[in-house]
Amino acid sequence: MNLASPVPAASPEPLSRRKREFLDHVEATVDDQERWRKINDVYYSADHQFMRFLIPPGKRVLELGCGRGDLLAALEPSYGVGVDFSPTAILRAKAGHAHPTLQFHLGDSEDPQTLAQIEGPFDYVVIADTIGMFENIDETLRMVHQLCDPSTRIVISYYSHLWEPILKLGEVLRLKSRQPKVNYIATADFLNLMDLADFEMIRHEQRQLLPRRLFGLGPLINRYIAPLPGIRKLCLRTYIVGRPVRQFPDRKLSATILVPCRNERGNIENAILRMPKFGSSQEIIFVEGNSSDGTFEECERVRDAYKGQWDIKVLKQDGKGKGDAVRKGFAAATRDVLMILDADLTMPPEMLPKYHAVIESGKADFVNGTRLIYPMEDEAMRPLNLIANRFFAYLFSYLVNTRMTDTLCGTKVLMRKDYEVLARERAYFGNFDPFGDFDLIFGAAKQNLKIIETPIHYKARTFGETQISRFRDGWLLLKMVWFAYRKLKAV
């Protein structure tokens, strides 16, 4: 594909009176926008910075309502297409951002002919501040599906309707440019329109409490104070990330079951004996963590004993901690879906097909187990551990914008292709997690994966002792909360 080749001109549908008024306003003010951007540099810089957080560089990006192309260029796409109905804006975009990876197309984003002539699919579709100008939001979103695949994410940004009086006052005081009347739509209404168009929200963020510099206080407050619960509802900017709702009832995916194990000799053979058959094919990887009870030798014995029935690999851990074991095992995996089964078997292996089906059917991109829905067996979890799990579940639900009741459950499931992206982008977080749970959860949240919790019947351990130290690991979790806040919220 020649990225620099021009998009053929469409025969556009005539603009409505309302859109004609919008177009006249844009044409009359497009050259004045650069001055306003300099005046409100803090606002625009923060907006572009957060959009780059949501959309990593090197992606295929379509922006509907691209204006002068500044945001699209700032996202550094590998292939970027901008659409706008203003001839002057498109000319400025082409002149200001002449790059072989960028195309700018004159057309109405709500016109089916315009969208039909764009070459997709895209990794991200961006609608920034223009959705309030659309006349048929749900119908336009429905047309966007033709430019999406199942992994595409749609990013919609807009002003909070609570700020409408303040923004109008800013226009009167000439603190911002005058705008034609747009639809200030509440988030609940946006979610309803997305639902009608077969998109579902997977992320909801609110930013910019003080969109001015204010002697340096504005950026500081916007970074650390504005994202806090409660306060964020007062922010100017709202960002919604959604994904197409698509089900795959007939899809068949293979599975890798990773079993990290340390001093679990008595559970190794039971893991195989209790393992159900599911998916198009399976492999089981034991990653042994330098045990003192002969676990590694038992893994090798079980591998050889069941060679004709199961594809089993045995690896020895190089470093320490479950996180290191997960990274080593997943790097060696060859199947479509990656699954973690703790060797203590407190999560029954018989439950694994249920988790696999959630991914296989397309209901979610990342499945996290939860032990806190169904009643537990006696002594399966100590009271202090239960309290800590509830506390951290609240914190991490806020951090990843998804309700999570049990982030510490060891069972995690995701597609290998998504894990490979997560691994390539791991440098954003670094090697911070000895557990392995939060490396995956935070990476999935950063990648805008759809996360779903699936309950398990948590069983008491039948062999060996827990590897967890409540107070030491609790302190580490508190440090990770702060770490995650800086990496996922204070950006």
Image (tube, rainbow, N blue to C red):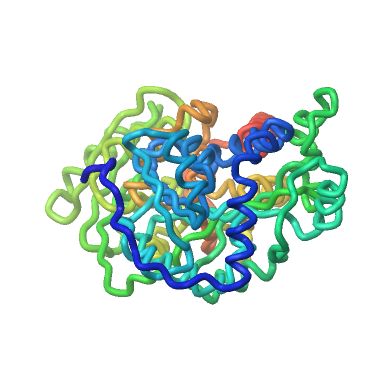
> How many numbered marks, from 0 up?
0
Q: Nearer the viewer, residue 362 or 347?
A: 362
The residue sitting at 82% across, 42% down in the picture is 174
Quarter of the image for residue 480 reads top right
Q: Residue 111 at what x, y percent from top left?
A: 44, 69
**Is residue 480 visible to the viewer in this orientation of the structure?**
no
The residue sitting at 53% across, 30% down in the picture is 429
Quarter of the image for residue 91 reads top left
Q: Is residue 433 above or below residue 85?
A: above
Q: Residue 9 at what x, y percent from top left?
A: 32, 59
Q: Nearer the viewer, residue 350 or 54?
A: 54
- Viewed as shown, does residue 52 lie left or right of 294? right
The residue sitting at 58% across, 59% down in the picture is 23
Quarter of the image for residue 278 reads bottom left
Residue at the outermost left position: 308
Q: Residue 483 at what x, y percent from top left?
A: 64, 31
Q: Is residue 111 above or below residue 479?
A: below
Q: Is residue 364 above or below residue 45?
A: below
The residue sitting at 35% across, 68% down in the picture is 11
- Viewed as shown, does residue 279 lie left or right of 89? left
**Is residue 246 visible to the viewer in this orientation of the structure?**
yes
Q: Residue 338 at what x, y percent from top left?
A: 35, 49
Q: Nearer the viewer, residue 426 or 273?
A: 426
Q: Is residue 408 above or below residue 242?
A: above
Q: Nearer the viewer, residue 225 or 52?
A: 52
